[in-house]
Structures are given as structure tokens and as C-alpha cells.
């Protein structure tokens, strides 16, 4: 592959090869597309060859034979020597062809590459609808940004292709180097799964990408043909020709102008809002649905999209029936009725909609040509009317048309409502203004939607508004309200005749007694009379109805297709498929045709018409609300290039739309709201897995931030105390019982943070940590656990928990209680871990113990909630089983090494050795993969881990409130028994007391509990706590602590002190004797617990404290072990000795 000499001359200061040096080349090799473990781009070292010239002996300048050696390692002594010499001199980024096709040996780089300034070809600067590009690099002259900074670097300069969505063709989505690659990880494969930052394509994005791969022959419209023409045709409906004159007759010129201006204000505000949304980023197909869903989220977008598409489908029937009725009137006038009027409407309507379907299916280009033809007819008809209004004739005066006269204008200024009101007339007119989204609805077929939608929509509103006002003033100035249709000239004896017709020589006073057939009030076809050539007005009516029907027939499938692509409603995916280069929704056309045909056959649309208008108005209201909502959320992503909008004006527009809905038809407005609400609730319940960066998310963040700051400004109060727990769970699903039990009393009450301390001897990999954080937070959400997952890197568990206690949370939302699992294996592992564990316990802490254990992460299987889609490539080395590292007897509850002991310690995971990385928690076995049969111990462990997810039957929660810690020991059981699963459990309270004061102590506690308003079933006063424990239990305790005694009497004092300093957990004889009474109390309490609470669902007990520095870790751990062994699930609770309960109001 040769490069022109123009690109081979080195710039000053550039580190290029001399003329005598050549490059080791392999012109024909290029790697295939990325496999799941390959990068989207590769970083290769450019090696120098030792050969000074080519094999043919001809000298060549550097770059003439420079071709990429795509990842092929240099071979042979000469190549390796050259490689060593050039090692680290500069690196080259080669993009891998995603299609997997190999580059031909004689491939020539695109022109855009040859100057070395950029990695982009000219074609890749096109819009995201362009074809897929393949990038080939010359590793010498076309090094990344070689010319830009005068040296080789893979640090990228700003480029539009870095900001494209993943829905764009893969060849056009460039990925900038990550920070880790720029720092020191260039030798690693940057994205093992082929995508950066988890940007996998969703099904909808994949479909969009496939559609856009081939842009040849796609028809795209500009703002005139695509938006202006469609909007004008839709707004100029039948209303212009057959209802505008009647509205002027009822409301008068002034109020008619007010009606037009009111409708124009609503549509103008909506047009401004539409323009703001449409210019806030790239707009795809889907029109109103796309704009609303990307602004307010799938809940509002999904609900409005469905009814908007349905409204357009039914609107097709409305316009076709309007056309058919006009044709039938013509047939009646010439006595050419086929059967009867109703059936004629059905026949003509069916033929018409079939023809319109044919035009639509033929393609958007044919449809656009038809629209322009219809617009020409419509404009001619409008000019025909205005020209005719200046040409009065004697024959037309009998019908009420006298030409422009001030008398007629003054008479028609005021209203003359007959069986109507202002609002009823407004309701009749407003549907004429509901065509403003006709252009936006085909946003996917516009060349530049951001330019076309604002310009075309607003100009259409202006032009049509002026025409409506012109027609209102014109008809009111030249046509009288009532006319007989006969030449009733005024004679001298009619002295009571005072209206404008009298002054012009005509007497229509008989119309006051009996209804006449002509004039503004009576003749819907009066504009045909006024016009210069009557049939042109009929042609205009045909044009208006057919163009509106055609626009709706195109809009409905396009909107519905976009809705189906997003998979908001399951089962509608079949309508997402497009055909041809324009991705025409043929299935949507057929569905719209069927809906339209059904309503045409009904032929009675007076009932459905108000509902359709309300559906459109609901869409307008939500578009306006979207702008207000996005502005209120103050998201940095809300920066529309269209600046002529105001959030409060948009809010007023949304309110106006809602008011107009009820003005038009109150019951239709209620029905519309009920349908939208029902669809909203359905979509909210289904929770579609989409993330469009909606303003709802932005406002949620804004409100959370605002409320967090407000909360921080208020001092804590006892009445508002909530347990805010930092739970050291490790991976959230590795200790299910711990997670479920704490969640039971914090759900909707307090904060719960799942802390995970990750100890590592290697340099921390914060990218993996961030991936884990996202992954397990998603897992918590899917398992409906209201908690946060916060992992940290630390040297050990104590340091990590201190980091978490200090740094986790926000403002007042910070943990005040540490919850950890009991260290069941403390006697089998390194006692330094026990020292760390004991030092971990702060003043406010809860320890949870299950006799079966808590950690299930060593059991092989697969959790069903942790779907394969969630697993990132960075975690695949962790999804392993460590069953083989267990003892040969298969008892997985007893780890056989210090490594596995560390895994089983609460909330800590060792990353020292990949081979010993613990498995991800595996609660349910995957039936597709082979599994090792569970032993009895693991089976019991799994069953115990799920016990708090089941409904607790009629049982007890035993509270052993031995020491007053501020009330946390009592508050947790109260919160627990308020939950649905625990509501059948009764609280029993156990307290210490003297034998001779049992009744007094019971009454005192009952009084206190009643003041706290906490229900209890029983109070037990234990008068025999200080009784000596059984001898066998004391002996068992002595055997437990025997390995941990210092035994200072058996060695020299200096040696004993040195051993105590090295192993501070050792128990001295003096210490053991000093705390003999406290030791006996723990043994005795265990006996009492077995006696009274062996059948309890849960035991909550005051945790014994030890004086720091005086009680060794081994002794304190022995106390906790002895106190809680062989019991139902037990919580050892110690509050921070500040009141969390109060009986004051």
C-alpha cells in the first residue's frame, strides 16, 4: 500500500524514521472484527526493521512502504532487534473492522487520512444516517493526531464521532481512549466486550442502526415540503369553507376573531414548545410520541403515543367521511344517488381510503407529491373566494352577498347566538387548529428536523391564522346573516325595516318569523356563492379533506412504529418492522387502514369527533408540560437551540389545553384523562428497561438534592429518629438473611447501605469497583430491596468500615447504626482477623447470628435475578466455584485455608489471588449448567438464608432488654412487627430484676412501654440472672478459651509481655479472674435464652460491652459466642446511648 509523497515529508520536530530506515511491513494482514474478548481498537507498537532497504534494492522515503502490521509480533532476530530499538517510541491506534472483513492488500487509505491530521474519513462526518465506514491506518504517516501536536499520541482531539449514540452505525461511533489507557494500561485490551463503558445496543438501537446502514435512495424532506405544506393542509380543513361563515354569523366578527386568536395562542405556544424540544438534540421518527417520551419518559410518552396514534387513525375516517358526505351532496343535487345517502357515504369512503392507502404505500415521495397537488388546489380555492368577494352581482344579493359594505360590517360586528354559546362555537372551531403536529409526526423523514420543525410549524400557524382571520373579517363584511334567496326588494311602506339589507334595497325581515335558507347563519355553502367560480370551492373542500386524511394516514403508522420499536407495550413488536429504503411501516398502514375503515362503515362520527380532538389536545398539553418540566428540572442537558420559549408560558399553554378539552366536551375530556392515566399506570407498573435521560430523572435529582440540603439545615429530633444502617454484606446477595432482615425494619422507614470492604494487595482497580457498584445497585432494585450498595478498597475490614462510616451517605442521610454478621469461623482462622472484627464494633452496632451461618457465596449455582445481561466482562473472572478448595469431606461450612476464612468474614473479599476469588452469590442453581449436589449443611444454609423472606407465622419476637441503650433494642422489634410478614408475631419483653421486686419491675416496664405506645404480649422479669451457670457449660467455656490463654505463669515475665504485645488477643489469667462474674453471666444468659426463647422467631438482645484495652479480643469474642450459640436467629443490639424513643408529643 503506497502513500503519496505529499504525506511523507516529516514536519520539524516529529519523531519520524530516517530515509535509511524502513518499517517491517505485512501489507496483507488485518485482524478480523472484534470477538467478545477483543477491542474495538487495538494499540500496536510500531517496530523498526533492521533492513535499510526493500528486497528490490530501490531506496524509498519513510512512509512510501508504510503499512500496518496489525498486531503481528515481530519474528526473527533482526525484527526483534529492531523492535527492541523502537520499543515505546510511539504507538498507533488501529480500528478493527466490526464486520470482520479483511482489508485487501492493495487497499488505499481514504483521502481524509493522507494528511495525518485526523483519523476520520470525510464520509464519517456525515449524519448518523450515513453508511458504515471502515478505518485503515498507515502506522507511520497516519499516526493518531501526528500533525496536530507535532508528536505521537493517542490522546484524542474533540471529534463529533465520540459523541454519537450507540444506535448510529458502528463504524461511525468512535471511542476515545480511556484514562487508564492514557496513563499506563496501553498493553491491555481496552474493551474486552467490544463496547466502551457498557454501551451495549438495546434491541431498538440495533434496529435503528440496521435501518441507517444504507442511506442510498432514502427520501428526506426539507422544511417546506416536509412540515409547512403538511401543517397548512391539516389546519386548513373543511372548517375553512363550510363552517367559518357560520361561526361569523353566530359570534360576529369580533368574537370570531377572538375565537381564532384563542385557538392560535394555544397552537402557537404548543408550536414554540415543540420547537424547543425538537432543537434539544437529534430527533428520530415518531413525532409527538418521540418528543414527549424523550422529555418526560416512557410513562407519559407510552400513554400519549398510543392514543395519539389511535386518534390519527380515527381522524382518517373523519376526514374521509367529510369528503364522502360532500360527494353524496353533489350526487343528491343531480339526483344520482346509488342506494341511500348513508350507504353511499360508506361506499365512497371505502373507495377513497383504499386509494389513499395506495398512495401512502407507494412511498413518502408519492405522498408528498400528492400533498403539494392538493395544496395548490386549496390555495387556488382560497384565492377564488377572496377574488369573488370583490365581484358582487345582482343574482347573488338574494342569497345575502352584497359585496363589502360598512353597514353589513357594523351589523355583523356583534354576536347573534342562536341555540349556541361562545364556548360551543369555539368548540366547533378548535378542531380546525389541531394539525400543527403533522410535520413533526414524520420527523424521521425530515432531512434536518431541528431546523424544519420550528420553521415549518410556526410559519404554518402564522399563515393559516392570518387566512382564518381574513376569511372571518371578509365574510362578516360582505354577507348578511339571513337571506330569503328571492329578490325581495324594499317598497316604501316597510318602515320597520332597519337592518343593513334594507339600506341596500332588500327586505329579509321574513327570516325573523321563519327560518330562511341563506345567509351566514343558514347556508354552510355560502362561500361557494361568493367565490368567483363555485366548483373551485368544492374542489377546495375535497382537497382539504383528502390532504388531512392522507396526512393522518401517514402520521398514525409512523408514530405507532416508533412506539412499537421502543417495546413499551409487549405484543406490539410486529408493527415495528419497516420495509424498503425508507423503512415504511407497511403493517402499521394496514392496521390504520382497518381502524379507519371500521369507523367509516359506522358513518356516525359525531360522537367520536370530540374524543379525537381531546386526544390531540392531551398531546399538546404534554408537549407544553414537557418544556416546563425540563426547564424546572434545570438539567445541564436541556439547552435547546431554539431560544424563543418560556417555561411559564409553556405551563400556561398546558393549562389552556386542559381547559379547552373541557370546553369542547367535558365527558370526552374526562374519558381522555382516564385513558391516559390508565396507560400511565400500566407503563409505570411494567417499568420498561429504557433510559432516555428524561426530565423526570433530572427533576427527581433536583428535588432529592434540594430536600437533602433542607434536611441538613434541621436538627435531628427524637421523634424523627430512624435507624440508618450500614450493613456489611459484602456482595449484596452473598448474605441474603442479613440483607432481608435489615431490610425488613428499614424499608420505607430508614436508610440502608450495603457496605462492601474489598481488601487487595494489588493496586485498586477502580473501574471494576464502579462496574460492581452499578451492577449490584441494579440487582438491589430488581430484587425490590430499598438499599444502596457502596464498595470501598481498604487494607482491612476495620479500615474499610471506618471509611464507610465516615464517607457514606449524604447530609442527614448518613448511617447511625452498623450492622454486621457474627463471625462464625472465628476460632478457625487467623486471630488477627478477630482482633480487626472486634475493633470494628462501634458504640451503635447490631450483630446478627444464625446458627447455620450467613454467607452462601461458596455454594455453586446461579442467582436468577443476576441475569447474564448484567454481567460485565470485568466480572467474568469472579464467576467461579471454590467448592474444590474445600476439605475433601465436602463440608463447605468449614473453610480449609486462611484464604477461604477471609472470604467468610463479614463483608470482606480478598482479591489477592484470582484463583481464589470468591464466587458471586449463588442462591438458585441454573438448570442448564451441571451442578454439584449440595451437602446437608449447605442445604440447611440455603434454607436459613431465605427464612426472612417468608411470612412469619404466629410466633414471638423476644426482646431481652437488659441494659438501657437509648431504646434501639426496643425500636427495632417494634418496626419489624409493623411489617406485613411479621405482623402476626407478638413482642415479649424480658428484663433483669430482683426476686423480691418482680411485680414492681413488671409494672414499671409495662408503664414505660404503654407510654412509648408499643404493644407487647408479655413481660418477664428474670430474677435468677446471677445464679451460677451449670458446671458443664462453664467447662465448655474453659475449653473454648484454652488455646487463646497467654499462660503467663508458665514463662518469664519479659517473654510473656513480648508475646502479649505481639498477640494482644491473648487472655491473661488476671483478666480472666477479674471478669469471672461477667463471664458467668454470659453463660447463664445463654441457659436462660434456651429455656425461655428457644421457640422464638427472633431474639433481640442487649449486646454486652467490654472495656476497651482491658478485655482481650478472644475473651470478648468468647462471650458473644457463648451468649448466642445454639439459638434461633438473634440480634445483639447496642445503641449509642442516646434516646431514640420518647413519650412526649
Image (spheres, rainbow, N blue to C red):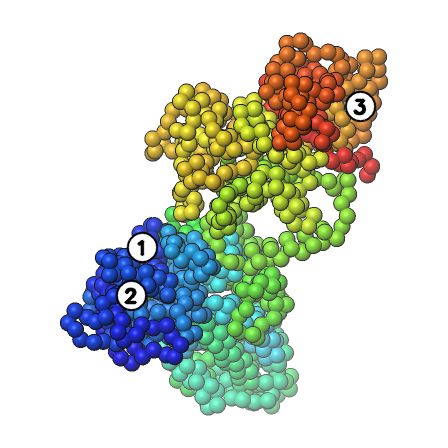
The foreground one among 203 and 883 is 883
Q: Which label's residue is closer to the chain start, 3 or 1?
A: 1
Does 606 appear above or below 845? Answer: below
Work out which quarter of the rendered image holds the C terminus and state it. top right
Circle on res. 1093:
none
Q: Which residue is mark 3?
A: 1005
| Mark 1 or mark 2, whichever is nearer to me | 2
Residue 719 horizontal/vertical position (percent)? 76, 40
The foreground one among 297 and 14 is 14
Q: Tell me the SS state at disc 2.
A: strand
Seen as rendered, the residue at the extreme top is 1031
Does 230 appear above or below 38? Answer: below
Q: Which label's residue is closer to the chain start, 3 or 2?
A: 2
Answer with the quarter of the image where residue 669 lies: bottom right
Q: Are the two marked residues, 3 and 2, in contact with CB atoms closer than 8 angstroms? A: no
| Mark 3 or mark 2, whichever is nearer to me | 2
Q: Which residue is mark 1?
A: 34
Residue 442 horizontal/vertical position (percent)? 40, 67
Q: Residue at x 49, y 60 (%)?
A: 294
Amino acid at each position: 500500500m503506497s502513500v503519496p509523497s505529499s504525506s511523507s515529508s516529516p514536519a520539524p520536530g516529529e519523531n519520524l524514521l530516517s530515509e535509511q530506515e524502513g518499517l517491517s511491513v505485512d501489507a496483507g494482514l488485518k485482524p478480523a472484527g472484534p470477538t467478545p474478548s477483543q477491542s474495538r481498537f487495538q494499540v500496536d507498537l510500531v517496530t523498526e526493521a533492521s533492513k535499510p532497504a526493500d528486497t528490490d534494492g530501490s531506496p524509498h522515503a519513510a512512509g512510501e512502504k508504510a503499512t500496518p502490521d496489525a498486531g503481528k509480533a515481530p519474528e526473527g532476530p533482526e525484527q526483534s532487534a529492531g523492535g527492541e530499538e523502537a520499543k515505546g517510541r510511539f504507538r498507533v491506534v488501529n480500528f478493527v473492522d466490526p464486520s470482520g472483513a479483511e482489508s485487501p492488500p492493495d487497499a488505499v487509505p481514504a483521502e481524509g487520512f493522507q494528511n495525518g491530521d485526523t483519523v476520520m474519513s470525510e464520509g464519517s462526518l456525515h449524519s448518523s444516517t450515513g453508511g458504515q465506514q471502515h478505518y485503515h491506518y498507515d502506522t507511520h504517516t497516519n499516526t493518531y493526531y501526528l500533525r496536530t501536536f507535532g508528536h505521537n499520541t493517542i490522546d484524542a482531539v474533540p471529534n463529533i464521532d465520540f459523541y454519537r449514540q450507540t444506535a448510529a452505525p458502528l463504524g461511525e461511533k468512535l471511542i476515545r481512549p480511556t484514562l487508564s489507557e492514557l496513563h499506563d494500561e496501553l498493553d491491555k485490551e481496552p474493551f474486552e466486550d467490544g463496547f466502551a463503558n457498557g454501551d451495549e445496543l438495546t434491541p431498538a438501537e440495533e434496529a435503528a442502526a440496521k435501518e441507517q446502514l444504507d442511506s442510498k435512495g432514502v427520501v428526506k424532506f426539507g422544511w417546506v415540503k416536509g412540515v409547512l405544506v403538511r401543517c397548512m393542509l391539516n389546519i386548513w380543513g373543511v372548517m375553512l369553507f363550510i363552517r367559518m361563515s357560520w361561526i361569523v354569523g353566530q359570534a360576529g366578527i369580533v368574537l370570531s376573531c377572538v375565537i381564532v386568536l384563542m385557538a392560535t395562542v394555544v397552537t402557537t405556544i404548543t408550536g414554540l414548545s415543540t420547537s424547543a424540544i425538537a432543537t434539544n438534540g437529534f430527533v428520530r421518527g415518531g413525532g409527538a410520541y418521540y418528543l414527549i417520551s424523550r422529555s418526560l419518559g416512557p410513562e407519559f410518552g407510552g400513554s400519549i403515543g398510543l392514543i395519539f396514534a389511535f386518534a390519527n387513525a380515527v381522524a382518517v375516517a373523519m376526514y374521509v367521511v367529510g369528503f364522502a358526505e360532500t360527494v353524496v351532496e353533489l350526487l343528491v343535487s343531480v339526483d344520482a344517488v346509488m342506494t341511500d345517502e348513508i350507504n353511499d357515504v360508506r361506499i365512497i369512503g371505502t373507495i377513497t381510503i383504499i386509494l389513499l392507502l395506495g398512495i401512502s404505500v407507494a412511498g413518502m415521495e408519492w405522498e408528498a407529491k400528492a400533498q403539494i397537488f392538493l395544496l395548490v388546489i386549496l390555495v387556488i380555492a382560497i384565492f377564488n373566494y377572496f377574488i369573488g368577494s370583490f365581484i358582487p352581482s345582482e343574482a347573488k344579493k338574494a342569497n345575502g352577498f352584497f359585496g363589502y359594505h360598512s353597514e353589513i360590517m357594523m351589523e355583523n360586528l356583534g354576536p347573534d347566538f342562536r341555540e349556541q354559546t361562545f364556548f360551543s362555537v369555539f368548540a366547533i372551531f378548535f378542531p380546525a387548529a389541531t394539525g400543527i403536529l403533522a410535520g413533526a409526526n414524520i420527523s424521521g423523514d425530515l432531512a434536518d428536523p431541528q431546523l424544519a420543525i420550528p420553521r415549518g410549524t410556526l410559519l404554518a400557524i402564522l399563515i393559516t391564522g392570518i387566512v382564518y382571520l381574513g376569511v372571518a373579517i371578509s365574510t362578516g363584511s360582505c354577507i348578511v346573516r339571513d337571506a330569503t334567496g328571492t329578490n325581495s326588494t324594499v317598497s316604501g311602506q316597510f318602515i320597520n325595516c332597519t337592518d343593513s339589507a334594507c339600506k341596500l334595497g332588500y327586505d329579509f325581515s321574513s327570516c325573523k318569523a321563519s327560518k330562511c335558507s341563506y345567509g351566514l347563519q343558514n347556508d354552510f355553502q355560502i362561500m361557494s356563492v361568493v367565490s368567483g367560480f363555485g366548483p373551485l370551492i368544492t374542489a377546495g373542500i375535497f382537497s382539504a379533506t383528502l390532504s388531512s386524511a392522507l396526512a393522518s394516514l401517514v402520521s398514525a403508522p409512523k408514530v405507532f412504529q416508533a412506539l412499537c420499536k421502543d417495546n413499551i407495550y409487549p405484543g406490539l413488536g410486529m408493527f415495528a418492522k419497516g420495509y424498503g429504503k425508507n423503512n415504511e411501516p407497511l403493517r402499521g398502514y394496514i392496521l390504520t387502514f382497518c381502524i379507519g375503515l371500521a369507523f367509516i362503515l359506522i358513518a356516525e362520527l359525531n360522537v367520536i369527533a370530540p374524543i379525537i380532538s381531546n386526544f390531540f389536545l392531551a398531546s399538546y398539553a404534554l408537549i407544553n408540560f414537557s418544556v416546563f418540566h425540563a426547564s424546572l428540572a434545570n438539567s445541564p442537558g436541556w439547552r435547546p437551540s431554539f431560544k424563543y420559549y418560556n417555561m411559564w408560558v409553556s405551563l400556561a399553554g398546558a393549562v389552556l389545553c386542559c381547559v379547552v378539552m373541557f370546553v369542547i366536551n367535558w365527558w370526552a375530556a374526562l374519558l381522555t384523562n382516564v385513558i391516559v392515566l390508565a396507560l400511565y399506570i400500566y407503563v409505570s407498573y411494567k417499568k420498561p428497561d429504557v433510559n432516555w435521560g428524561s426530565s423526570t430523572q433530572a427533576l427527581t435529582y433536583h428535588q432529592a438534592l434540594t430536600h437533602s440540603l433542607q434536611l441538613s439545615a434541621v436538627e435531628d429530633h427524637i421523634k424523627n429518629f430512624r435507624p440508618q444502617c450500614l450493613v456489611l454484606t459484602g456482595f449484596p446477595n452473598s448474605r441474603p438473611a442479613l440483607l432481608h432482615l435489615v431490610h425488613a425494619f428499614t424499608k420505607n422507614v430508614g436508610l440502608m447501605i450495603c457496605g462492601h470492604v474489598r481488601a487487595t494487595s494489588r493496586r485498586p482497580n477502580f473501574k471494576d469497583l464502579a462496574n460492581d457498584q452499578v451492577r449490584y445497585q441494579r440487582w438491589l432494585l430488581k430484587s425490590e430491596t430499598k438499599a444502596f450498595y457502596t464498595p470501598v478498597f481498604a487494607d482491612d475490614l476495620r479500615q474499610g468500615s471506618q471509611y464507610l462510616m465516615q464517607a457514606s451517605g449524604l447530609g442527614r442521610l448518613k448511617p447511625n447504626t452498623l450492622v454486621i454478621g457474627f463471625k462464625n469461623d472465628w476460632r478457625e482462622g487467623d486471630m488477627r482477623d478477630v482482633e480487626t472484627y472486634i475493633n470494628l464494633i462501634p458504640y451503635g452496632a447490631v450483630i446478627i447470628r444464625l446458627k447455620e451461618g450467613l454467607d452462601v457465596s461458596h455454594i455453586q449455582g446461579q442467582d436468577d435475578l443476576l441475569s447474564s445481561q448484567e454481567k460485565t466482562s470485568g466480572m467474568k473472572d469472579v464467576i467461579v466455584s471454590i467448592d474444590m478448595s474445600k476439605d475433601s469431606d465436602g463440608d463447605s461450612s468449614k473453610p480449609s485455608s486462611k484464604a477461604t476464612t477471609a472470604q467468610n468474614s463479614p463483608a470482606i473479599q480478598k482479591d489477592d489471588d484470582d484463583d481464589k476469588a470468591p464466587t458471586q452469590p449463588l442462591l438458585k442453581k441454573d438448570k442448564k449448567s451441571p451442578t454439584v449436589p449440595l451437602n446437608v449443611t449447605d442445604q440447611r444454609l440455603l434454607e436459613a438464608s431465605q427464612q426472612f423472606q417468608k411470612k412469619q407465622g404466629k410466633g414471638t419476637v423476644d426482646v431481652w432488654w437488659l441494659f438501657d441503650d437509648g431504646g434501639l433494642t426496643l425500636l427495632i422489634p417494634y418496626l419489624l412487627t409493623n411489617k406485613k410478614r411479621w405482623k402476626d408475631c407478638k413482642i415479649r419483653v424480658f428484663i433483669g430484676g430482683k426476686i423480691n421486686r418482680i411485680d414492681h419491675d413488671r409494672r414499671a416496664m409495662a408503664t414505660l412501654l404503654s407510654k412509648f405506645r408499643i404493644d407487647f404480649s408479655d413481660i418477664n422479669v428474670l430474677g435468677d440472672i446471677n445464679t451460677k451457670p451449670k458446671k458443664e457449660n462453664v467447662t465448655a467455656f474453659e475449653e473454648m478459651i484454652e488455646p487463646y490463654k497467654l499462660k503467663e505463669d508458665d514463662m518469664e515475665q519479659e517473654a510473656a509481655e513480648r508475646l502479649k504485645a505481639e498477640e494482644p488477643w491473648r487472655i491473661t489469667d488476671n483478666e480472666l479472674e477479674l471478669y469471672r462474674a461477667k463471664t458467668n453471666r454470659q453463660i447463664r444468659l445463654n441457659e436462660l435464652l434456651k429455656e425461655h426463647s428457644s421457640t422464638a422467631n427472633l431474639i433481640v438482645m442487649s449486646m454486652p460491652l467490654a472495656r476497651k484495652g482491658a478485655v482481650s479480643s478472644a475473651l470478648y469474642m468468647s462471650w458473644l459466642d457463648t451468649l448466642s450459640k445454639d439459638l434461633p436467629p438473634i440480634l445483639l443490639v447496642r445503641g449509642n446511648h442516646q434516646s431514640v424513643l420518647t413519650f412526649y408529643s
